[in-house]
Each structure stands twice: as structure tokens, then as C-alpha cells.
Image: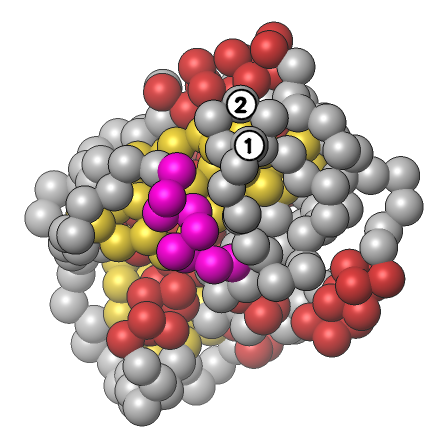
């Protein structure tokens, strides 16, 4: 497979990643026409390394979906606008969604907007009533977008505590040198230390952080960490999460002036049963 070249985000990527939080409480107002247009126009410019067509549709409770119940099971308060993401079921579809849409999330964050990825806590039937979707489309997630509320709701506080939103796995649990038997140090990571640090800050479903990276020479091998026994829908979300992490790594590397290409390569070391190889970043 030939992977595509993607552009660098026109924002301070590292500072934006550090500022991004999952927002579940919003001011009860729609985006201004200016902010909506800016977001939609930027989305139209986005691509992903996998060449997959990721479709993002804008939903407004104030215009077009006034009389439709949009259920988020009480997890979101005040949001008037949502982005719905659909994609055809094909190789790397979920990684493409994660990579491309996270770039839009980071751009929205730079605009001062709040967002949160929702994969399991929304009623798909409700949202399917107000978007264009075919029987062949996957509908993995939605994202409320708006102006963050001044105070977090009680549900949001409980959710953040239960998910451990501020906690991140340590380096020795995520990054490895040459194979999975030796942890990667920041000294070993060298000029890619920041890219890996920003990868650690990527959001993921239930804050599971289902990713691992093995540095082998100038190669960074990306793996998705999950048990084979989980169902296919959950596997898809794990791969979506890995796409988000790849976005953080790749965009940070580009912002640091580092060049590399994505490829699929043979893995010559032993891989644990729960580690699923996805892609390799080759530093140039």
C-alpha cells in the first residue's frame, strides 16, 4: 500500500495538544457563522495518509435538527452543534478517521472551541435521522463542538474521575527499543522525544491508550494493543484510537522539522499476542 503525504497543521501543535481536553459541558448556544464557516472550510482541506474518504457532517440543534432527539445518555450538557463522522468499511478506515478527525479537533481547540470524541455514549439511531448515511457506511463516532461551559457538570466530573482522564501510562508501558523486551528511554528517542510525548497525550475510548511503539533503528513501529477475544466493534474503536495517536506523533514530528514516511514492513522480532502491528514511520 502506498501512503499519502499529508500537510502540517497551521497551528502550534504541541501547545494545542497540551491544551486539548475532553469537554462535556457547553454554553447553550450554536457556533457563530464565522466560527462554523472557519471550521467547515478547514475540514474540507484535510486528508489522511491512508487515502480513505472520511466524511464529516455538521449537525445543528438550532437549524435542521430542531425537532430531533439527539441522545448522548446524559454525558453531554448544553451542546447545540455536533460533527458526525462516517466512512466506508475498508482497510485502514478507522485509522484514517482517527488521524484526520483528530487534526480537525486540534484545529478547533486552537480556535478556542470545546470537543470530545464520543463512540459509545450516543444514540446512533437518533443521529442517523439527520445525516446522510448508506447501509455500507460505518458510523463510529460523533463529536459535540461548541464553546466550553464555565463550570463542569456533576456528570462530567464523575466521568473524568472514572476514566482517569488526567492519567497517562508511563513511557516504559508504551514505548520500546528494538523489541518488546526493553523499554525506550527519552535518550534513546532523541529528536522524536516530543513526538512520543504528544502521542501519550492522545485521547482514547475509556482512556485505554491502546497503543505501543517499538523504535528499531530509524523505524518507529506502531502497534494496537487489545485482546483477540473482544468484539469487532470494540476492535474498530481501538484502531481509531491508534489513528488519533499517530496524528499526534506525525504532526508533532512535522512541526519539529522532522521528515519521515509511512510504510508497512516486516517485523522480525517477537510480538506479544495482544499486540497488532499497524504501520511503521521511517525517519529520514
Number of numbered discs overlaid on the protein picture: 2
Residue 66: mark in rendering: 1
User: Which residue corresponds to the image point at 40% horizontal and 67% vertical from the top-left?
Assistant: 238
Give the vertical position of 226 relative to 252 (above or below): below
Asked whether, in this view, residue 128 is left or right of residue 20, the answer is left
- Quick one: SS at disc 2? loop
**CA–CA distance between discs 1 and 2?**
6 Å
Residue 222 appears at what percent x and percent y?
35, 63
Give the side of residue 28 with respect to residue 130, left or right: right
Q: Can residue 124 be seen in this view?
A: yes
Say which element carries label 1: loop
Task: Give me the residue at 33% from left, 52% from top.
Answer: 139
Asked if the residues shown at circle 1 and circle 2 are in contact, with their CB atoms under 8 angstroms apart, the answer is yes
Pick whichever, 109 or 122, lies toward us.
Answer: 122
Asked whether 124 falls inside the magenta stretch, the response is yes
Q: How crowded is mark 2: few (under 14 residues within 10 Å), some or many (20 or more)?
A: few
Tell me the crowding category of disc 1: few under 14, some 14 to 19, or many 20 or more residues within 10 angstroms, Cα based.
Answer: few
| Residue 63, disc | 2
Residue 146 rendering spot, x and y as whole percentages: 67, 32
Residue 206 shown left or right of residue 19 in the figure: left
Q: Where is residue 107 in the image (x, y as percent from the top left)?
A: 56, 28
Q: In this view, does 219 lie above or below 79?
A: below
Observer-nearest of 275 and 140: 140
Residue appearing at x 53%, y 48% in the figure:
70
- Nearest the viewer among 88 and 194 is 88
Range covered by the magenta-colored residues: 122-130
For residue 10: magenta?
Answer: no
Residue 263: in sight, yes or no? Answer: no
Amino acid at each position: 500500500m502506498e501512503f499519502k503525504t499529508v500537510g502540517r497543521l497551521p497551528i502550534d501543535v504541541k501547545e494545542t495538544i497540551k491544551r486539548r481536553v475532553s469537554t462535556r459541558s457547553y454554553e447553550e448556544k450554536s457556533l457563530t457563522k464565522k466560527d462554523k464557516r472557519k471550521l467547515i472550510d478547514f475540514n474540507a482541506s484535510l486528508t489522511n495518509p491512508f487515502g480513505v474518504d472520511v466524511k464529516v457532517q455538521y449537525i445543528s440543534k438550532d437549524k435542521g435538527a430542531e425537532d430531533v432527539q439527539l441522545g448522548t445518555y446524559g454525558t453531554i450538557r448544553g451542546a447545540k452543534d455536533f460533527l458526525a463522522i462516517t466512512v466506508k468499511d475498508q482497510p485502514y478506515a478507522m485509522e484514517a478517521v482517527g488521524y484526520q478527525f483528530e487534526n480537525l479537533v486540534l484545529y478547533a481547540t486552537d480556535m478556542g472551541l470545546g470537543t470530545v470524541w464520543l463512540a459509545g455514549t450516543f444514540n446512533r439511531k437518533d443521529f442517523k435521522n439527520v445525516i446522510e448515511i448508506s447501509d455500507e457506511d460505518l458510523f463510529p463516532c460523533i463529536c459535540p463542538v461548541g464553546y466550553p461551559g464555565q463550570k463542569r457538570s456533576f456528570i462530567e466530573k464523575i466521568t473524568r474521575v472514572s476514566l482517569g482522564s488526567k492519567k497517562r501510562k508511563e513511557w516504559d508501558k508504551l514505548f520500546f527499543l528494538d523489541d518488546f523486551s526493553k523499554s525506550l528511554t527519552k535518550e534513546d528517542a532523541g529528536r522524536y522525544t516530543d513526538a512520543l510525548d504528544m502521542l501519550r497525550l492522545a485521547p482514547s475510548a475509556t482512556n485505554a491508550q491502546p497503543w505501543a511503539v517499538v523504535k528499531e533503528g530509524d523505524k518507529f513501529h506502531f502497534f494496537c494493543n487489545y485482546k483477540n477475544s473482544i468484539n469487532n466493534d470494540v476492535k474498530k474503536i481501538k484502531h481509531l484510537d491508534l489513528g488519533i495517536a499517530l496524528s499526534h506523533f506525525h504532526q508533532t514530528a512535522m512541526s519539529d522539522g522532522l521528515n519521515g514516511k509511512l510504510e508497512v514492513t516486516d517485523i522480525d522480532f517477537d510480538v506479544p499476542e495482544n499486540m497488532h502491528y499497524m504501520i511503521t514511520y521511517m525517519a529520514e
